[in-house]
């Protein structure tokens, strides 16, 4: 049996030092920094013991934008928001089941920095009605991402910060040691719900300072000292 349409291309992220990372799925984490949870009107847990379970959602694999490319302003919104996030790239499969922290950490092949672009007006309307966030989150070009850097070259994440500049002004700045759920925590929680596979990306959630992007805006997202993502919103 042959395919009745041309095979859709596999989305790929460039890797520093050579090669590409083919993307299978994009998992995203909501409300993973207390200051951002509060700015969105949600309760922030007072301690790790009270953090409950993480909020997960997805973007389609072909939502990625690579190569410091232009990002077209999406249809259907008047309030496109930026959310700078650490992105973990998995290089090993793990069947569904509770992963230990050690096993979870061993799944991560590389890290990058990305934007979880959000049609905030559509997300807000969905939230108000208790409906899914898909149209607010999982749209074309909604996941610009930097090149990936080998985990061994990134070092201790706890010492790293995220900074987003738009037209030269700092919009978001946060420290990864403030993540409510760190990378092993999130992979442990995801593995209770899904088989994880090489090719999966995990967008780890954003610190406070989310705000609007408009056509013409130039952004620089930085995982400090490690990697940067440059881009521009086009009309
Ligand atoms: Mn986000």
Image: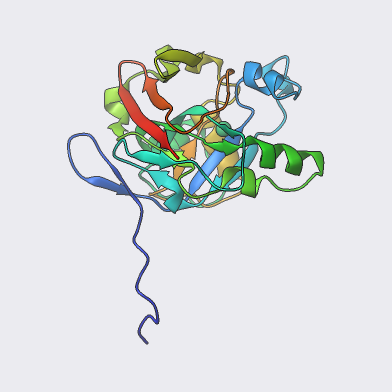
Q: In terms of depth relative to the viewer, which is nearer, 130 or 197?
A: 130
Residue at (41%, 19%) from the top-left corner?
Answer: 167
Residue at (74%, 44%) from the top-left corner?
Answer: 126
Residue 173, position in %: x, y? 49, 14
Q: In terms of depth relative to the viewer, which is nearer, 164 or 15?
A: 164
> What quarter of the picture does the N terminus occupy?
bottom left
Q: Residue 106 appears in which quarter of the rendering?
A: top left
Residue 23, position in %: x, y? 38, 50
108 left or right, relative to 122: left
Q: In the rendered view, would you say 147 is above or below 74?
A: above
Residue located farthest toward the bottom when viewing the structure as drawn: 1
Q: How is the image coloured?
A: rainbow
Let me know if residue 98 appears in the view.
Answer: no
> What quarter of the picture does the C terminus occupy?
top left
Q: In terms of depth relative to the viewer, which is nearer, 135 or 196?
A: 135
Report the label total: 0
Q: In terms of depth relative to the viewer, which is nearer, 218 or 67?
A: 218
Residue at (39%, 26%) from the top-left corner?
Answer: 218
Image-quarter location of ligand 1: top right
40 left or right, relative to 161: right
17 left or right, relative to 24: left
Residue 82, position in %: x, y? 52, 29
Residue 216, position in %: x, y? 42, 30
Q: In the rendered view, would you say 35 is above or below 14?
A: above
Let me know if residue 119 appears in the view.
Answer: yes
Residue located farthest toward the right when viewing the structure as drawn: 129
């Amino acid at each position: 049996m042959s395919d009745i349409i041309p095979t859709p291309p596999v989305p790929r992220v460039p890797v520093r030092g050579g090669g590409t990372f083919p993307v299978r799925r994009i998992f995203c984490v909501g409300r993973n920094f207390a200051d951002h949870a509060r700015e969105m009107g949600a309760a922030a847990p007072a301690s790790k013991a009270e953090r409950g379970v993480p909020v997960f959602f997805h973007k389609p694999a072909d939502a990625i934008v690579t190569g410091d490319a232009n990002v077209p302003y999406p249809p259907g919104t008047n309030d496109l928001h930026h959310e700078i996030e650490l992105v973990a790239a998995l290089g090993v499969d793990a069947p569904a089941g509770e992963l230990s922290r050690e096993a979870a950490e061993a799944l991560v092949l590389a890290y990058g920095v990305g934007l979880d672009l959000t049609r905030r007006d559509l997300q807000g309307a969905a939230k108000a009605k208790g409906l899914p966030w898909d149209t607010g989150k999982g749209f074309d070009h909604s996941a610009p991402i930097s090149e990936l850097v080998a985990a061994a070259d990134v070092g201790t994440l706890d010492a790293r910060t995220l900074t987003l500049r738009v037209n030269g002004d700092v919009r978001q700045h946060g420290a990864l040691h403030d993540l409510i759920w760190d990378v092993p925590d999130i992979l442990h929680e995801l593995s209770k719900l899904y088989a994880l596979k090489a090719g999966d990306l995990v967008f780890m959630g954003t610190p406070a300072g989310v705000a609007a992007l408009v056509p013409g805006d130039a952004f620089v997202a930085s995982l400090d000292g490690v990697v940067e993502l440059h881009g521009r919103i086009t009309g």
